[in-house]
């Protein structure tokens, strides 16, 4: 059982891979999807993500995460995260494996 309360899926249309949406509509529909569905909005286009990931993906991802942690420790003013949604503008809400940024 999910610990996140999600809106009733019957009243909100599901996300469709390749559909063009603005970020607010994407986010509303994403919140209404079942908990195991992963999706991103990139350039206004919906991408439904496949899962689970393989070792071939996980091994370099772990190395990248280690590099980011090391870089952050020695570079003041940087922040990072793993598998966190990133809100860019009205047409972007990707969820990268890792990210490193300088907050504005």
Image (spheres, rainbow, N blue to C red):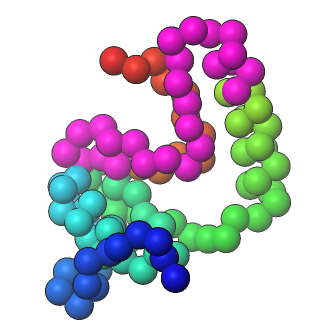
Relative height, residue 38 to residue 34 (above, below): above
Residue 23 location in percent, x, y? 22, 53
Q: Is residue 81 magenta?
A: yes
55 left or right, relative to 99: right
Closer to the camera in the image, 60 or 28: 28
Q: Residue furthest front?
A: 3
Tell me what residue is drawn at x 20 percent, y 80 percent: 12
**Residue 28 among magenta residues:** no
Question: Which quadrant of the rendered structure holds the C terminus?
Answer: top left
- Any part of residue 78 in sight: yes
Q: Residue at x 80, y 57 (%)?
A: 56
User: Hey, which residue is sitting farthest bottom in the picture?
Assistant: 10
Residue positioned 23% across, 66% down in the render: 28
Q: Is residue 22 left or right of residue 19?
A: left
State the extent of the magenta-drawn residues as a range: 69-93
| Residue 73, position as x, y percentages in the image | 69, 16
| Quadrant in which residue 69 is drawn | top right
Q: Hey, which quadrant is residue 80 in on the image? A: top right
Residue 41, position as x, y percentages in the image: 34, 55
Q: So how many labels did they put on this image?
A: 0
Q: Within the image, what quadrant is residue 70 found in?
A: top right
Residue 13 appears in the rendering: no
Residue shown at 45%/18% (left/top)? Answer: 102
Q: Main secondary structure of the magenta part?
A: loop
Which of 15 and 65 lies nearest the eye of the viewer?
65
């Amino acid at each position: 059982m999910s610990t996140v309360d999600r809106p009733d899926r019957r009243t909100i249309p599901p996300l469709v891979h390749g559909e063009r949406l603005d970020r607010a509509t994407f986010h509303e529909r994403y919140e209404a999807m079942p908990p195991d569905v992963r999706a991103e909005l990139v350039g206004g286009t919906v991408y439904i993500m496949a899962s689970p990931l393989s070792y071939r993906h996980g091994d370099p991802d772990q190395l990248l995460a280690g590099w980011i942690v090391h870089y952050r420790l020695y570079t003041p003013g940087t922040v990072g995260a793993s598998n966190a949604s990133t809100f860019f503008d009205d047409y972007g809400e990707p969820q990268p494996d890792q990210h490193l940024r300088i907050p504005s």
